[in-house]
Amino acid sequence: MKVCRNSTEKLCRLHWKSSMIILIEFILGGRKNMVDLYCALIIAEKRTFDSVPKRYQEAVREQLAAIGLDENGNPIE
């Protein structure tokens, strides 16, 4: 498991679990595959929100907010 910068261990586990849930949803299919993929990449810090294509940004923002994360994949406080 990756160590999160500037967060507690509990938030790090939330971060990791959230990315795994989204990754599993992506693998199992569904109509929001690309949104799930971009969310998982943002949470894993492999992609930034600004690098997500414009057509997916709003859906990605909503998906991240639904699991309690901001556009950078950090927990909303």
Image: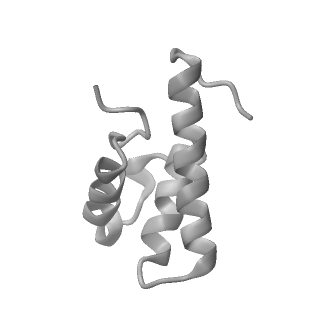
* Quadrant of residue 68 within the rendered picture: top left
Q: Nearer the viewer, residue 23 or 10?
A: 10
Q: Is residue 38 above or below residue 4?
A: below
Residue at image point 63% right, 74% down: 27
Q: Is residue 74 left or right of residue 19?
A: left
Viewer-closest of 27 and 52: 27
Residue at the farthest right position: 1
Tell me if 57 is positioned left or right of 30 in this view: left
Q: Is residue 77 above or below residue 6?
A: below
Colour scheme in use? one colour
Residue extending furthest front? 10
In the rendered image, residue 26, in percent from the top left (x then y), is placed at 56, 72
Total count of labels: 0
Is residue 29 shown to the viewer in this render?
Answer: yes
Residue 29 drawn at (x, y percent): 55, 82
Task: From the viewer's perspective, tell me whether residue 75 is left or right of residue 33.
Answer: left
Quadrant of the snapshot with the N terminus: top right
Q: Please provide percent x and percent y for residue 18.
A: 52, 48
Give how far across and how far down residue 30 sits, in percent. Answer: 48, 83
Identify the residue at horizontal 55%, vertical 57% (top origin). 21
Q: Is residue 25 left or right of residue 27?
A: left
Which residue shows up at 60% across the image and 25% down it? 4
Residue 4 vs 37, above or below: the answer is above
Residue drawn at x 30%, y 53% as measured from the top left: 66
Q: In which quadrant of the rendered image does the C terminus lie? A: top left
Visible residue check, residue 47? no
